[in-house]
Amino acid sequence: MPNFTAYAAHEAAGFALLHPVPEEIASLRRHLRALHPEAPTAPHPGLLAADAALKSAAEAATTARALTGVARTCAVGAAGDQIRAAVQQAARAICTVEPTAARFRGTDMPVTPETITAAALAYIRAEAEPEEIEAIGQGTPMVLVRCSSDRKLGWEITARITAGVRTAQWWMEAHPPLVLRFRRLDGRLGAADNARRLLWRKNPAKRYLAVTDVPVEFCNDPRV
């Protein structure tokens, strides 16, 4: 099974590149530290070096913001470049542990109750509260497909597919979402029903979602 802690760490690196703020840098460092015990020996120096680079970049950003005038402007710019370089270094180090972390694919998705539960535990380990970790063991492994139509003519449907664990309080994802876009098959049906028709055929051998012994839920995404 792929290293799902690495997938979460690489996703955190992407967030840190988009929003290079102290909170995202701290989150990425937590992910690196969570990944370290699971990594083979060879990538350890790279993970440690990446963590040190992130720490140094964060300290440089803090120092820069304390300055004033032109000196502050120059220092903030330089610190931003240092942060981006450190995050990119971290992303490379993560990929030495799990080469597929840069691009999660459908074939990487866990498909059995046991692998979904294990993946969810690994994926959320760095950021989860103890009660969330405990809840996963008592929850229901499943696949959730959130569906939406485009806002123009409504002919393109987007399905975001995630295996995870449903608990009494939370939906705990096990990996970055798989995003599938396709043309509406039946104009009389909503987005979720169109996705079900495409992905969940009656013949199990022809199903896009090759999951085993877990429920699959299709829903119209209320967030869109």
Image (tube, helix red, strand yellow):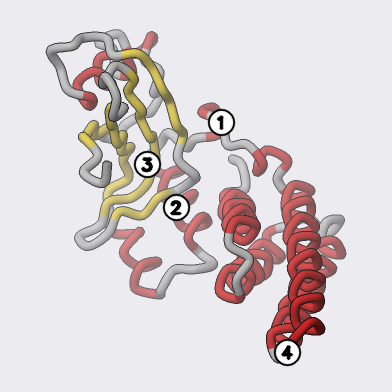
Q: Residues within 10 Å of mark 3 (few under 14, many from 20)?
A: many
Look at the numbered discs 4 and 3 and tell me whether their residues touch, using CB distance below 8 Å: no
Task: State which quadrant residue 17 falls in.
Answer: bottom right
Q: Which amino acid lies under the numbered mark 1 shown in the image of this protein?
A: Arg
- The residue positioned 35% from the left and 59% from the top of the image is 136
Front of the two marks 1 and 2? 1
Which circle's residue, 4 or 3, is located before the other in the chain? 4
Q: Residues within 10 Å of mark 1 (few under 14, many from 20)?
A: few
Tag on residue 105?
1
Tag nearer the camera, 4 or 3 = 4
Mark 2–mark 3 contact, CB under 8 Å? Answer: no
Q: Is disc 3 placed on a helix, strand or loop?
A: helix
The CA distance from mark 2 to mark 4 is: 45 Å
Q: Residues within 10 Å of mark 4 (few under 14, many from 20)?
A: few
Q: Dividing the image into 4 quarters, which one contains the N terminus? A: top right
Q: Position of residue 22 (x, y in %)?
A: 61, 76
48 is higher (above) or lower (below) than 123: below
Three-letter amino acid code at disc 4?
Thr
